[in-house]
Image: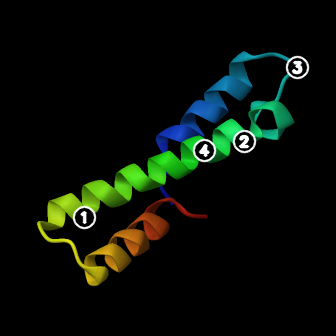
Amino acid sequence: MKQSSIEWFINELDKTIPYQHISTSQIFTDIIEQAIEIHKEEIINAWKQGDGQYDKVAEKMSVEYYNEIYNK
């Protein structure tokens, strides 16, 4: 599975901010979830645009592509 830019960012923050694990902090949980959702939408939209046509098949394929590459 490929690491997304969001996951990389979270890991880097965890390494640099001592005594504070960003990925388990309630303060950051909502922000991280929003960032992951925005990243997912960006990847799906880019995939659809690259396809040149928008229909239900393209939408389904773009979601499948994202899930195959980034979902664990």
Residue type, mark 3 in image: Tyr
Mark 2 residue type: Asp
**CA distance for labels 2 and 1:** 27 Å
> Marks 3 and 4: in contact by CB < 8 Å?
no
Seen as rendered, the residue at the extreme front is 55
Give whichever of discs 2 and 1 has the lower sequence position.
Answer: 2
Judged left or right of residue 17, residue 39 is left
| Rendered residue at 75%/17% (across/down) | 17
Q: CA distance from mark 4 to mark 3?
A: 24 Å
**Above or below: residue 7 compared with residue 19:** below
For this orientation, the residue located farthest to the left is: 52
| Mark 4 lies on residue | 34
Q: Secondary structure at mark 3?
A: loop
Q: How is colour applied across the structure in the image?
A: rainbow
The residue indicated by pointer 1 is 48
Cα distance in 3D space between marks 4 and 1: 21 Å
Marks 4,1: beta carbons within 8 A = no
Above or below 54: residue 44: above
Q: Quadrant of residue 64?
A: bottom left
User: Is residue 6 shown left or right of residue 10?
Assistant: left
Of the residues under marks 4 and 3, which one precedes in the sequence? 3
Please tell me whether mark 1 sits on a helix, a strand or a loop. Answer: helix
